């Protein structure tokens, strides 16, 4: 099954970016759009830490499934969701963990949004 969601030309900072078939079939990865064609994610490859990626990187363009905007998300000039996410850069990847000591991909997104008062489901397939 291939998941297709619309890619909004008006994508905004804080939108969730979903990818499919990255390390398992279906929706298998989620990142937070941080502007300027960049996304923040908890990575399980290479450095295994929270890091910034470019949406234009071939791997992501091939695996892109779509975006979702969190309802009622108000991003003031200070962009708190991006601040929270970037404060966690270089935190190590840890499967099944949702704390500043380590994150898996869904746990990272859930934790960042919780810090600004928005509760998301624990797993990326439920966030969708």
Image (spheres, rainbow, N blue to C red):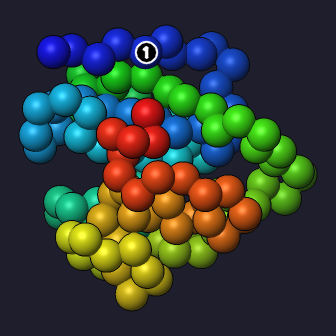
Residue 4 lies in quadrant: top left
Classify residue 37 as left or right of residue 64: right
Q: Position of residue 1 (x, y in %)?
A: 15, 15
**Image coordinates for residue 51, horizontal then vertical, percent:** 41, 62
Q: Residue at x 49, y 12 (%)?
A: 6
Residue 95's place in the image compared with 106, above or below, is below
Which of the pair 46/124 is nearer the observer? 124
- Residue found farthest to the left: 24
For residue 109, side relative to residue 118 (left or right): left
Which residue is located at x 41 percent, y 58 percent?
Answer: 122
Q: Is residue 116 something that shows in the picture?
A: yes
Q: Residue at x 40, y 74 (%)?
A: 98
Name the residue beneath numbered marker 1. Answer: 5
Check the picture and name the quadrant holding the C terminus.
Answer: top left
Asked whether, in this view, residue 128 is left or right of residue 95, the answer is right
What residue occupies the far bottom of the structure in this picture? Answer: 101
- Looking at the rendering, which quadrant does residue 101 occupy? bottom left
The residue sitting at 35% across, 80% down in the picture is 102
């Amino acid at each position: 099954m291939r998941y297709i969601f619309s890619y909004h030309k008006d994508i905004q900072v804080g939108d969730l970016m979903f990818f499919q078939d990255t390390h398992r079939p279906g929706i298998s990865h989620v990142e937070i759009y941080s502007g300027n064609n960049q996304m923040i994610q908890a990575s399980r490859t290479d450095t295994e830490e929270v890091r910034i990626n470019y949406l234009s990187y071939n791997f992501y363009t091939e695996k892109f499934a779509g975006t979702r905007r969190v309802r009622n998300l108000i991003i003031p000039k200070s962009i708190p969701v991006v601040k929270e996410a970037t404060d966690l850069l270089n935190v190590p990847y840890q499967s099944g963990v949702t704390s500043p000591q380590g994150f898996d991909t869904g746990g990272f997104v859930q934790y960042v949004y919780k810090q600004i008062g928005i509760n998301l489901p624990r797993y990326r397939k439920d966030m969708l």
